[in-house]
Image: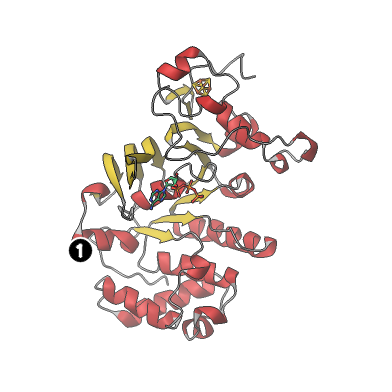
Amino acid sequence: MTETIQQTDRPVDQPVEVSVSDLTVVYRTDLGELPAVSRASIDLVPGQITGLVGESGSGKSTLALAMLNAVPSPGRISSGSITVTGLGDVTKLAGRKLRHARGGTLGYVFQASQNSLNPLKTIGKQLLDLGRAHDVRDLRALVRRAAQLISEVGLDPDRVLDSYQHELSGGMRQRIGIVLALVLNARVLILDEPTTALDVLSQAAVLDIVRRVHRDSGLTTLIVTHDLGVVSEIADRLVVMYGGPNPEEGPATAVLHEPSHPYTRALIGAMARIVGDISAARVLPGRPPDLTTVPRQGCVFRDRCPLAMPVCAEEEPELVQWTPGRRRACHVEPTGVLS
Ligand code: ATP
Ligand code: SF4
């Protein structure tokens, strides 16, 4: 029987939906506060794996951290809301409530989590620290739950709990990151670049585990990645990011095979292995998005867009539904010009 660790009022099996609405996150710089995420809106649906993709600098990690209200200084959420079932607006949470939301409902696996464990403590000791930080009363039950999860991700619980991080491979540490994210019964799993820095076999194993725990536990999952190959393998839905409002979102297969936004097309064009034709690969034109260079008026992608028109410099396109289940933000009509 699956053991659960109760530390919130939410029923442990309740499906959890996350709704990010009009969210702006800024960082303080020498040029003042500049937005890394601007008016982003994303819904994470229970039972679905959403892939959040974009180039380096497009604000993916910042948005993912904002979902836990954990944007590090000198950053801050300046406007918008993040509504989570059972928690309300996470941007309004603080103190004990926020600490319990992180881990208790929202599980996070950090970018390069292979290196984010404490090198001076065994995994078992770090597990107990986590339990105490979250006011878990029954630490023995927590250890039993962790052992069960460690088995589920294909590792030996006794060995793992007694190990220091340097005694585990990168792929094993990534699996431990997933275990620690879920051990307090989180219903939302957010993974930031879960396969980066892993060899191909470990990548495949980690994706297989994510797919399995997502399905078996009925989670709401977000995978943040710059690798379209990863999302093509695992994601149900795809959200594309580029600093400003999301250029495009929709069912993963539809977006990957029939991208509607010029940026999505350029991103996919730069990754030939999605379509399997290496000779068709094209370098993405221009520089990746950067806090200081992304246009603040009009369309954020206009300096790199082959279809840019005068209106693109003046007016920011709205994110609108153009066909059932798909939304895009572009002044060019989706049919005809982009076909
Ligand atoms: P990557 O995959 O490289 O992490 P990303 O899409 O996750 O990229 P973010 O890491 O969220 O993007 O960064 C978005 C923007 O915010 C970038 O321009 C980055 O330089 C800037 N940024 C991130 N962290 C800070 C910080 N602590 N201070 C100032 N600017 C920051
Ligand atoms: Fe290109 Fe204009 Fe569409 Fe932006 S709004 S993607 S600049 S055509």
Does 107 appear above or below 117?
Answer: above
Label 1's element? helix
- List the residue tagged with mark 1: 96
Drawn side of residue 8 relative to residue 259, left or right = left
Circle count: 1
Whole-percent x and y of residue 207? 59, 58
Q: Which residue lies at the image location 51% right of the left edge and 24% below the top edge? A: 302
Q: Amino acid at mark 1?
A: Arg
Drawn side of residue 35 relative to residue 225, left or right = left
Is residue 11 visible from the viewing direction of this image? Answer: no
Is residue 243 visible from the viewing direction of this image? Answer: yes
Drawn side of residue 74 relative to residue 150, left or right = left
Of residues 81 and 34, which is closer to you in this image? Answer: 34
Of residues 143 and 293, which is closer to you in this image? Answer: 293
The image quadrant of residue 14 is: bottom left
The quadrant of the picture occupied by the N terminus is bottom left
Whole-percent x and y of residue 171? 59, 68
Whole-percent x and y of residue 20? 34, 40
The image quadrant of residue 95 is: bottom left
The quadrant of the picture occupied by the C terminus is top right
Does 118 appear above or below 275?
Answer: below
Whole-percent x and y of residue 256? 62, 35
